[in-house]
Amino acid sequence: MKASTSTGAQDYERGERWTKIGVFFVGSILLGPIGIPFLVYGALYLRRAQMAGYHARPWHVTAIGASAIIAAGGNFLGWSLDMFAGRTGVYENFFAGFGRMFNAAYFLDINTTYLGGTAAPGEKSYIIMAVFMLWPMRLVAAWGFLQGQRWSFHFMKVTAWASAIFYFGWIANMAVHFDHYLGAEAAPLYGVIGWWIYITPWLMEPVIMLLYFYTVDPKSVFPDREFAPVGATEATVAENAEPISSERKGALHG
Amino acid sequence: MRPVADPTTPMQMSEERVVSVSAWLAVAMVALIGIEGLITVFWVLIRFGWSA
């Protein structure tokens, strides 16, 4: 980072650009390590803009929004490969290797069904649900959050709960179908312990998100937006509301 | 009868602290996911790349 005479706004713009490039790479998983330096570089610029007094987005919003995109994007990309591209080199090389090491549903009998990819029915059902519904919702919510959209606050909460339910069901499915994933039939190299070490960072996501979204004050996240004052009741809101004109009343009541 | 909880009781941890801890946990999660990507790609190649 050059010690130039750039303004806070310029630093902010640069920080935004590098952060987005970093998020793109880390979210792709396979190129993940390349993205980390970009993320750090972008974060330094964003910090400099904030230090210079530029009215920037709070750092925790960037951290939470970016991490949500990375987690959802990584899952979306990986499972999209399983959904649509099971019979490709990148899938067969990396997923089969991952399956042999950690999760044998991605190794045993892969590409033996019509759809291709994993042959475990429960796993495939979760993939279909997540690729077509959960991860797109989560990506939209997280992008909106980074852009300061007010609707995204609620959408992030809803999709955090959806992720929590998803992960719980997904892990339960592994336990029910244990032999095909981790048991004697499958015998992945690093066993049950290896699997839990691998998956824990991913399982942290809904926990972190629910902790954050049920604590943070929306006014600190979107300071330029209007919110109903704390303790406002329907009566006080109605008292302060603009009276409805007689034409509008007529339109409302037909 | 049990007393009604007092809504003005302060939280054990301040809001700022919880927000800061959760945001740092999110940063740690991203770092771990990035490292896992590295391990998965290179370890798959090293472990299985030249085996039959």
Image (tube, rainbow, N blue to C red):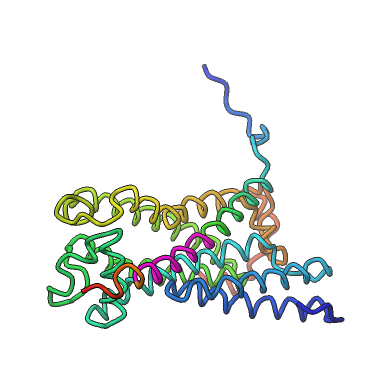
Image location of residue B29, percent across then percent down? 51, 58
Q: Is residue B3 left or right of residue A100?
A: right
Image location of residue A8, percent across then percent down? 80, 76
Is residue A11 among what the camera can see? yes
Viewer-proximal residue among A178 and A142? A178
Q: Farthest residue to the top: give it.
A: B1
Q: Is residue A105 above or below residue A95?
A: above
Q: Is residue A80 above or below residue A167?
A: below
Viewer-proximal residue among A32 and A214? A32
Q: Residue at x 48, y 50 (%)?
A: A207
Asked if residue B42 lies in the magenta stretch, the reply is: yes
The part of the image, by quadrant, that contains residue A18 is bottom right
Image location of residue A111, percent across then percent down? 17, 75
Viewer-proximal residue among A87 and B21? A87
Secondary structure mainly formed by the magenta segment: helix
Image location of residue A15, percent across then percent down? 69, 76
Q: Farthest residue to the right: give it.
A: A5
Is residue A132 among what the camera can see? no
Q: Is residue A226 left or right of residue A67?
A: right
Viewer-proximal residue among A144 and A71? A71
Q: Residue at x 28, y 75 (%)?
A: B50
Q: Is residue A210 left or right of residue A132?
A: right
Count of labels in the image: 0
Q: Is residue B15 above or below residue A17?
A: above
Asked if residue A123 lies in the magenta stretch, the reply is: no
- Indicate the quadrant containing the C terminus of chain B: top left, top right, bottom left or bottom right: bottom left
Q: Residue at x 65, y 51 (%)?
A: B20
What range is drawn magenta here? B30-44
